[in-house]
Image: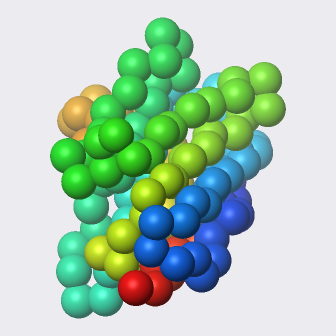
Amino acid sequence: QVQLVESGGGLVQAGGSLRLSCAASGRTFAYNTMGWFRQAPGKEREIVAAIRRSGGVTFYADSVKGRFTISADNAKNTVYLQMNSLKPEDTAVYYCAAGWGAQGMSSTSSYYAWGQGTQVTVSS
């Protein structure tokens, strides 16, 4: 099994920045794709960004393109999400996920391991 632990969430004003981290442990060879998803109250979980370990191919939701950057440190089994120019609509619980990406990088079905989530709140 792979265990994922997120950190870095918090409260920030609109226009500010936050950096989320997700550290993987356990069977860290058992995935090739890591993603960040978010879920706001009353809404479905949605993809934010994803990255493949080999080659560094990335995917971004249209709503975050140009503002968020996903990166990975494979030696540390850690993935990061740098969030800039934050907006109130970015408020959500952010989840880290790991998997093989077989159903596409943006699909929740591509991921089998999930972190506990970290709250991001953007005030206007």
- Taking the spot 48% from the left edge, 39% from the top edge, the residue there is 69
**Quick one: 101 or 45, which is closer to the camera?**
45
Horizontal relation, residue 75 to residue 37: left or right: right
Looking at the image, what colour scheme do you see?
A: rainbow
Identify the residue at the far right of this view: 76
Foreground pick, 96 / 85: 85
Q: Is residue 5 above or below residue 2?
A: below
Q: Quadrant of the C terminus?
A: bottom left
Q: Residue 20 appears at what percent x and percent y? A: 62, 56
Instruction: Give whichever of 30, 7 is nearer the camera.
Output: 7
Where, by quadrant of the figure, is residue 90 drawn?
A: bottom left
Q: Position of residue 93 (x, y in %)?
A: 46, 75
- Visible residue check, residue 72: yes
**Picture layout, residue 88 above or below residue 106:** below
Classify residue 14 by image quadrant.
Answer: bottom left
**Does any portion of residue 113 appear in the rendered image?**
no
Q: Which x, y percent locates residue 123?
A: 46, 85
Q: At x 61% / y 44%, what residue is drawn?
A: 80
| Residue at x 79% of width, y 32% of height | 76
